[in-house]
Structures are given as structure tokens and as C-alpha cells.
Amino acid sequence: MFAAGDGPRNSIDPDRVIARSRGRRRPLQVAAGAVGALAVVALVAVVVQTAPFSFPAMMTSQGASDSGSTTEQAPLPGDLESTLKRAPADRLNLCTGTLTEVAASFNGLRLDVAFPAQAPAGADPVDGTVRLTNTSATRVTGSTGATPAITLSQDGVVLWHSNGPTIMSLAIVDLEPGASMEYRASFTPVRCEVDDDLGPSFRDGLPAVPAGVYDLSAAIDFTADSSMLQPERPELDLVSGPLSQITIG
């Protein structure tokens, strides 16, 4: 850095050194910035391309997605769909509602109500029986609840139905073709309202139905044994039967 002899010495110009150093670094900084920008663009492109697959639009059978298109859900087989959607036997008919029409049993079972032809008016329970019959040509095995649900109706309107605590036990069903078994049952000739279905059981002091002719019906859930299961037959079967008239008063 220093010349020999008495000649003039070379001096270091700090400003030039800094300027040249910055000049050499600037292309590297530009290149690094360009690579970073490309990486960001690539990341954005990946996110944009994969977003529709990572976050699919929620579709329903009754609604549309955010994009405005509509997609129906794949329908379930008819028998399975109706089984999944239907109410259990004890919630099939509710107060003041329309009496539910029940399709025939998958397993050929039928319930028949057997109560006295006439019962006194008032708030006292009326006892009777319900008969479960195998109307199919094959043996039916499985189980049901301890008692069927009874519904009192008139002109297709539900006036009263079985409610309150139930017996937590099973009745074993093993019926050859044409064979039957019986359950004990009862109903109360009073009229319930919509609010009565909101609690665990009906309120006390429900008004008695007036004298007249009414209909009784029964329903019960039947669970088939595994040996009976077939693709066209669900495990849970709702069993009901014809209406039975009773005169009250």
C-alpha cells in the first residue's frame, strides 16, 4: 500500500471503497430478492391450486355451495332411509297431531288391539291386551320392548298416547308362521295437549274425553335376530296393525 522511496504515497479513499463494495453487493441482493419473490409466488400458486381440495365447499341436499352450484347427496336405499328417519314407536303419535299411517312390517308381523268394546268415561286407566302375530310364511325371531305403545284417537287426531317411564326389559319373539304372543297394555281416556309431550310424562288432571266412539291402535319396535338380517330387511322393524274401535261413556 505504500510505495518505496521518497515518492508520493498512495492513500485509501474510504468513500470509493464503500461505493465499490456496495456496487459488488447490489447484484447479489437483487438476485437474492428475485429468488425470494419467485419462492413467494410459487407458494401462493401452490396454495391457490390446492385450496379448493383442502377446503371443499360444504354441500347439502337442500342448499348450495359458496360457488353457487348445487349438489344432491347420494340417496339412501328406500327402506334404510325410512328406518333412519322414522320416530320410535313411543314417539310415533304425539298429542293433537295427525295419526301416523304405518307401512306393513318388513318381517310380516302385525299388532292387534284387544280391549273391551265399551269403557266408562273418566280418568281411570282401561286394561287390555295386544296380540303380536307372525303373518309371514317363515319363522320370525328377535325381541321387542316389554309393552307396545297405545294411541287413542278420533277422526285421525291423536287424543292420548302411552307416556311416562317404561319397563326397561325385552320380550323375546320366536314365532312360527301363524303363531302369536300377547302383551299387557292399557290406556287412559283423557285428552292431552302439545305441551304434554315436552316433559317426561303427562301432567296430572288431564280432561276426560266426552262420550263417543274412538279408535285404539298399537305400535312396537321389533329387533330381528342376526340370522334374519338380509340386505332388503333392516334390523329394526316398526310393527303396527289395524285400528280397533271402542265406545267410551
Image (cartoon, helix red, strand yellow):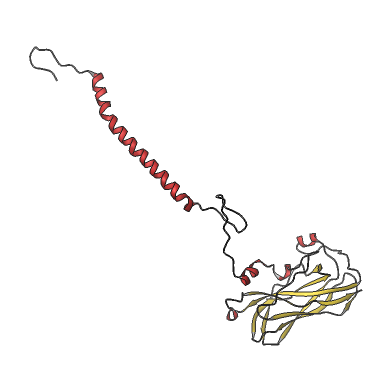
Q: Quadrant of residue 101?
A: bottom right
Residue 103 in the image: state x and y as whole percent. 70, 74
Residue 134 in the image: state x and y as whole percent. 69, 84
Residue visible at 79% across and 62% down?
196
Query: Is 152 drawn above or below residue 57 in the view shown?
Result: below
Q: Is residue 85 left or right of residue 99?
A: left
Residue 246 in the image: state x and y as whole percent. 86, 76
Q: How many discs mark residues in the rendered view?
A: 0
Residue visible at 44% across and 49% down?
49
Residue 225 in the image: state x and y as whole percent. 61, 79
Q: Nearer the viewer, residue 132 or 85?
A: 85
Residue visible at 33% across and 39% down?
35
Extreme front residue here? 69
Q: Is residue 82 left or right of residue 18?
A: right
Q: Is residue 121 left or right of residue 226?
A: right
Q: Nearer the viewer, residue 55 or 4?
A: 55
Query: Is 177 drawn above or below residue 202 in the view shown?
Result: below
Q: Is residue 183 left or right of residue 38?
A: right
